[in-house]
Amino acid sequence: AQSVTQLDSQVPVFEEAPVELRCNYSSSVSVYLFWYVQYPNQGLQLLLKYLSGSTLVKGINGFEAEFNKSQTSFHLRKPSVHISDTAEYFCAVSEKTSYDKVIFGPGTSLSVIP
Amino acid sequence: GAVVSQHPSRVICKSGTSVKIECRSLDFQATTMFWYRQFPKQSLMLMATSNEGSKATYEQGVEKDKFLINHASLTLSTLTVTSAHPEDSSFYICSARTSLSYNSPLHFGNGTRLTVT
């Protein structure tokens, strides 16, 4: 079974500074990887996804993530954050053979400080 | 883009009563919908997979008789929390894919905050 680890539960960062949110996964088979963002009292919105091909994936709102198979990581980055990026970020994984079942990491709370 | 509508957004009910939450795909048909539960400051836990025209598939540890799922049409799935108790208070979120393809992402509703008093 697959699992997802997000080592940082909370990440405070100053406005316009860069940020990296870490994600590591565990799976015995090939996977698809996702990052979702959740604003307070709302559902989740897809930021980006890795299905195949280029390991560097660009998403919405200036975010990007890099898939590293050897390190089983899929870290999320943004070169310059805005106040509006304050939210909860979830890394998620699904196995290619059963892609309907998406497993979410525990989440990282990003707080952008003005 | 694809929209998943969830209703109600908030509900408060008394212990022992039942509550129904609706999840609708507004501009696409969804043969499969997913129900998640989220505790405060925690991640989403998949509760069950709702299949149109057939029984839902529940994850281990989820009580089928307590969380009744009905997927009667290609655009509507409902989750009924029966005989609710305070420990059922949580944020419930549904999601659906626009197609069965592996590269079709999940689209989420805005969630339902259930408070059982």
Image (cartoon, coloured by chain):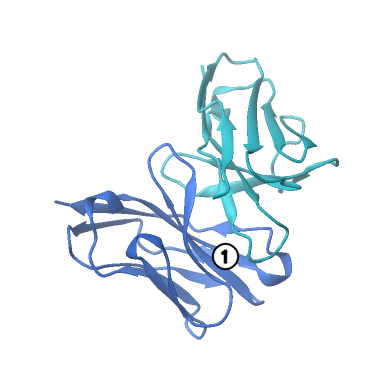
Instruction: Say which residue label 1 marks.
Output: A93
Residue at 69 percent across and 23 percent down: it is B82
| Camera-side residue of A29 and B28 | B28
Q: Residue B3: x, y in percent?
A: 57, 43
Residue at 22 percent across and 65 percent down: it is A80
Q: Residue A2: x, y in percent?
A: 62, 67
| Label 1, residues with CA under 10 Å away: few <14, some 14-19, many ≥20 | many
- Under circle 1, the secondary element is strand
Residue A28 sits in quarter: bottom right
| Camera-side residue of A25 and A40 | A40
* Extreme residue toward the left, this view: A114
| Camera-side residue of B117 and B24 | B24
Chain coloured cyan in the rendered structure: B
Residue at 73 percent across and 48 percent down: it is B32
Tell me the kind of residue under disc 1.
Val
Up the image or down, A93 lies above or below A41; here it is below
Up the image or down, A59 lies above or below B109; here it is below
Up the image or down, B85 lies above or below A108; here it is above
Q: Residue A84: x, y in percent?
A: 27, 49
* Extreme residue toward the bottom, this view: A70
Q: Residue B90: x, y in percent?
A: 52, 33
Chain coloured blue in the rendered structure: A
Residue B63 sits in quarter: top right
Up the image or down, A59 lies above or below B92; here it is below
